[in-house]
Image (cartoon, rainbow, N blue to C red):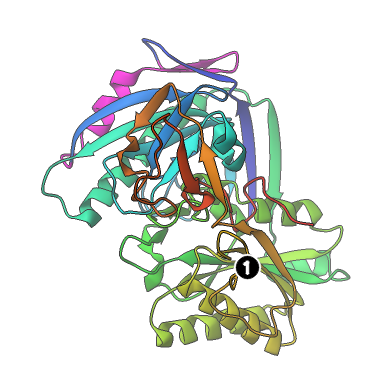
């Protein structure tokens, strides 16, 4: 598959009577977005706010972040199987409002939502302090179940991102990047002299609001399968997670997975990037055995010589990570693992809930238990009422002077296990 991404840089966001993009500025008609979102009978009210890099603004509790994009050529539309019809995507051309994002917040869905600070100490831990954010403050109808609430909030963010993405349909991109993965046999002929490398992406799918969707299907219901990497860029995977904010992959991260981009950058030079495999992280042992067996089998079937395996979440999924590591290694395939750590606030505790001798090449995205003090902000979008409840917070962690103490676990994207963040190790 061959996909062209056309980038339209966005340097500022402003309210206006007409939504449009001019000279790098995204102008937003808030009333249009409200009308669109309120078509869902599960939403009782919505407010639209703007948050720009460097402002004294805190967004919390954060549910999801989505990048506005539009499919301008090729089959399917954005977020197929969810808000557009089911059709295989990943080819043609997609235009991107690069630098813009839709963020959803409001009444808390689960206890593991996040914080985005646009300035101050917390801003250096989240990539979304650098984006021009259109924030939806959503209130669901009373009486909804937690799952109905989550669906309503998720769809609102996706629809708003599609609305804004549509503004880029007729624009001329400043730059165009092309990504292509040939069918396996053709790809092997083209770069048959290079090591065959693949990427195994583990998707959060533990249930109880720990969900990810592939073409609209809950990932815990899938068997490990092969995707063209360009399908992921085109919105085939979306987040439905209410897991710890630091290491969950918002939809924006799936759209911009840096592992995929880096593998493409080195494809045909250092190795042959042959395939991408997605697998899940279920709770029961039988499901873990089944999925890890299939993942290793697919790696062997494709003739891979090396794979990168990225985790999403921590604790229970650490077992899936180690089972994948062991079984892939037993096939004679080298594996590099990407994860983060929950090593205690002093860093001296066991980093992962599971381990195996095969995990001898591991990249850490940081210690989520690290404590940070966040300064008070002039404006809060959403509510700070939950900062002591969300994962990484604790009772009475907000001081009289307005500062908040949290583990970086509470900051959206702080320890991204696909490397979509700023922490590094040496």
Q: Position of residue 280 (x, y in %)?
A: 47, 71
Magenta stretch: includes residue 26:
yes
- Where 44 sits versus 296, above or below? above
- Where 295 sits versus 29, above or below? below
The one of 425 and 185 positioned closer to us in this rendering: 425
Q: Position of residue 112 (x, y in %)?
A: 38, 54
The image quarter containing residue 214 is bottom left
The one of 243 and 200 positioned closer to us in this rendering: 243
Answer with left or right where residue 329 lies relative to residue 289: right
Local secondary structure at mark 1: loop
- Where 246 sits versus 103, above or below? below
- Where 72 sits versus 214, above or below? above
Furthest toward the left, the residue is 143
The one of 305 and 122 positioned closer to us in this rendering: 122
> Which residue is painted at 42% across and 86% down in the image?
285
Q: Which residues are magenta?
A: 19-42
Magenta stretch: includes residue 182:
no
Q: Position of residue 91 (x, y in %)?
A: 58, 49
**Residue 259 in view:** yes
Where does label 1 land, which residue?
348
Locate the C terminus by quadrant. bottom right
Locate the N terminus by quadrant. bottom right
Answer with left or right where residue 6 lies relative to residue 192: left
The 10 Å Cα crowd at callout 1, few under 14, some 14 to 19, many 20 or more, is few
> Which residue is painted at 58% across and 66% down in the image?
343
């Amino acid at each position: 598959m061959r996909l062209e991404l056309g980038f339209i840089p966005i340097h500022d966001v402003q309210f206006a009577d007409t939504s449009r993009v001019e000279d790098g500025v995204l102008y937003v008609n808030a009333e249009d977005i409200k009308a669109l979102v309120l078509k869902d009978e599960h939403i009782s009210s919505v407010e639209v706010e703007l948050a720009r890099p460097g402002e004294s603004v805190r967004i919390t509790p954060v549910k999801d972040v989505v990048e506005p994009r539009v499919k301008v050529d090729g089959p399917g539309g954005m977020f197929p199987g969810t808000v557009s019809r089911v059709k295989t995507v990943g080819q043609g051309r997609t235009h991107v409002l690069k630098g813009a994002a839709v963020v959803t917040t409001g009444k808390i869905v689960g206890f593991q939502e996040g914080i985005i600070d646009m300035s101050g100490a917390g801003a250096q831990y989240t990539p979304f302090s650098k984006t021009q954010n259109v924030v939806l403050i959503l209130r669901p109808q009373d009486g909804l179940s937690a799952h109905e609430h989550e669906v309503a909030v998720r769809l609102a963010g996706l629809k708003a991102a599609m609305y804004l993405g549509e503004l880029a349909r007729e624009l001329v991109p400043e730059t165009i990047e092309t990504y292509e993965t040939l069918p396996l046999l053709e790809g092997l002929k083209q770069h048959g002299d290079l090591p065959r490398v693949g990427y195994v992406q583990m998707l959060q799918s533990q249930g109880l609001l720990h969900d990810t969707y592939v073409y609209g299907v809950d990932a815990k219901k899938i068997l490990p399968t092969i995707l063209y990497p360009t399908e992921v860029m085109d919105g085939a995977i979306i987040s439905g997670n209410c897991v710890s904010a630091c290491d969950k992959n918002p939809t924006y991260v799936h759209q911009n997975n840096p592992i995929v981009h880096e593998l493409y950058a080195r494809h045909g030079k250092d190795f042959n990037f042959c395939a991408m495999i997605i697998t899940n992280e279920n709770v029961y042992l039988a499901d873990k055995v089944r999925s890890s067996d299939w993942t290793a089998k697919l790696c062997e079937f494709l003739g891979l010589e090396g794979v990168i395996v990225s985790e999403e979440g921590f604790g229970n999924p650490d077992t899936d990570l180690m089972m994948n590591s062991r079984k892939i290694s037993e096939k004679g395939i080298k594996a590099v693992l990407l994860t983060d750590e929950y090593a205690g606030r002093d860093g001296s505790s066991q980093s992962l809930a599971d381990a195996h001798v095969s995990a001898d090449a591991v990249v850490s995205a940081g210690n989520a238990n690290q404590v940070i003090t966040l300064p008070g902000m002039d404006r809060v979008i959403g509510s700070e009422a939950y900062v002591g409840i969300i994962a990484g917070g604790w009772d009475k962690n907000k001081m009289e002077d307005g500062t908040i103490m949290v583990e970086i676990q509470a900051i959206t994207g702080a320890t991204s296990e696909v490397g979509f963040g700023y922490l590094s190790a040496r």
